[in-house]
Each structure stands twice: as C-alpha cells, then as structure tokens.
Image: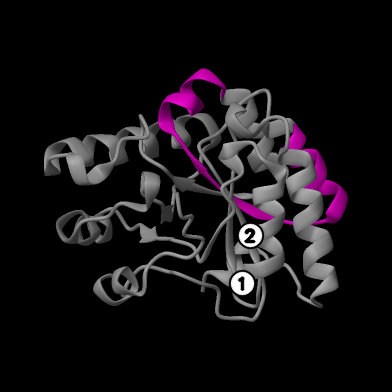
C-alpha cells in the first residue's frame, strides 16, 4: 500500500482556512490521540530534554480517563487541541453529532485543565465543508499537517524514511500519543530531532508557528 506523507493538494485548495504548514520556516511537533499514561510521560520527558514545545490534539474520552496526564502536558507548557471526544471520523457525523463531539471535548479539557481550546484536528484528516464552517462558531482553527510519519504502524524504519525524505522548513509533523507506537515513540522523537539538526532546521513553538 502506498503511503502518503503529505495530504493532497486538492484538500489544501478546498480548505484554505485550515493550517497546512508553519509560516516561519520552523518545524512544529504535534501529537494526536492522547493523553495516555504509557506514552504521554515518555513524550513529555523527551520534549523537556530537548527544550521543545508541541501541540497535543487530545481525545475527550482519554482526558476523562487520564486527567493527570493532561495536567502534566499543560504544566510542561505545551498547547492543546481538540481531536473529538471518541476519535470519530467527522465526515460520518451529522451536524448535531459533530457539535456534541467538539463541545464535550472542549468542556472536559476546561474542567480538568482550565483551558479553552483554540485548535482542532479531525481524526484521520477527514473534513467536510459543513463541519469546517462549523469550527468557526466554536472559535477553533483547523490544524492539518504536511508530514505524517506513520509512527502508529510501530515501524521505526518507516518513520526514519519519512523524516529523512520529507522533513523540511515549515513542516507540521504528526506523531501519536497512544500505545500503537509505544515501542518506537522515543526513538522516533530522537530521530526527528537528529534529522532536523542534520538538515539545519529548527523547531518552533505553537504560538509562533500557528499565527
């Protein structure tokens, strides 16, 4: 099966209000699907070691299960985004169901961490015109990406290939905060940092990368 590391140009044309890359020549780390007690601490330790900040796109039900991990993300100075409540593919949802997914996640994050979310990322990158417009009413900016590492396949060689070939200026880099990549997440982060250094690239913070 062919792997697509960068979403199609058609999607970028149809959804121009979405953020597909950074605009300051820097790389942004993002992590989907957390929080998770088995992976979140590993990710946070390494980001702290390298002095990096990231956006964690969290799933509402995971926040409910693991509130302490969410608090750790916030206390470490990282940003948060809405990744729906049950990791539902939003193109399969009605408008009412979509509203429920977004509202429930916003509420649980605010209850646990006292933070109002500004960012959204659709599971599997699926987005519709209707629901894209609805994000505006929630005050959410849709954050996509231009480098999917496929770390959830738990194969470090795939991650290495993606980073060596496609990591570049203005990359929004996706990795995952779940047990699917438990065996390789630390090595994946280390390799991303090393590859960036080899290419003379810099990582940026969410506030500067997503202006």
Horizontal arrangement in the rendering, residue 14 relative to residue 4 (left or right): left
On screen, 46 above or below 65?
below
Of tags 1 and 2, the one toward the viewer is 2
**SS at mark 2 in the image:** helix
On the image, the x and y values in percent for residue 186 come to 77, 40
Can see residue 198?
yes
Q: CA distance from mark 1 to mark 2?
A: 24 Å
On screen, 24 above or below 17?
below
On the image, the x and y values in percent for residue 151 come to 61, 44
Can see residue 77?
no
Residue interval drawn in magenta = 42-66
What colouring does the structure picture have?
one colour
Q: Is residue 50 magenta?
A: yes
Residue at the spot 42% in from the left edge and 25% down from the top edge:
61
Horizontal arrangement in the rendering, residue 15 relative to residue 95 (left or right): right
Q: Is residue 197 magenta?
A: no
Q: Which mark is residue 208?
A: 1
Residue 118, by quadrant, is: bottom left
In front of the other: 86 or 200: 200
On the image, the x and y values in percent for residue 119 come to 43, 55
Residue 205, by quadrant, is: bottom right
Say which residue label 2 marks.
162
């Amino acid at each position: 099966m062919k792997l697509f590391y960068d979403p199609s140009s058609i999607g970028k044309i149809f959804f121009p209000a979405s953020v597909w890359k950074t605009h300051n020549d820097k790389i942004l780390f993002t992590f989907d699907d957390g929080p998770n007690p088995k992976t979140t601490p590993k990710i946070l330790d390494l980001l702290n070691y390298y002095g990096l900040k990231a956006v964690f796109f969290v799933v509402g039900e995971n926040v409910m299960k693991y509130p302490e991990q969410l608090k750790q993300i916030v206390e470490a100075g990282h940003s948060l985004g809405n990744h729906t409540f049950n990791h539902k593919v939003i193109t399969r949802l009605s408008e009412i169901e979509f509203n429920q997914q977004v509202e429930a996640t916003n509420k649980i994050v605010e209850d646990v961490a006292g933070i109002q979310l500004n960012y959204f990322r659709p599971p599997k990158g699926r987005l519709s015109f209707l629901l894209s417009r609805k994000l505006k009413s929630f005050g959410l900016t849709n954050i996509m990406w231009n480098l999917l590492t496929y770390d959830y396949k738990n194969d470090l060689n795939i991650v290495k290939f993606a980073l060596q070939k496609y990591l570049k200026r203005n990359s929004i880099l996706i990795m995952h905060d779940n047990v699917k990549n438990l065996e390789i997440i630390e090595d994946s982060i280390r390799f991303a940092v090393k590859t960036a250094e080899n290419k003379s690239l810099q990582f940026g913070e969410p506030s500067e990368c997503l202006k």
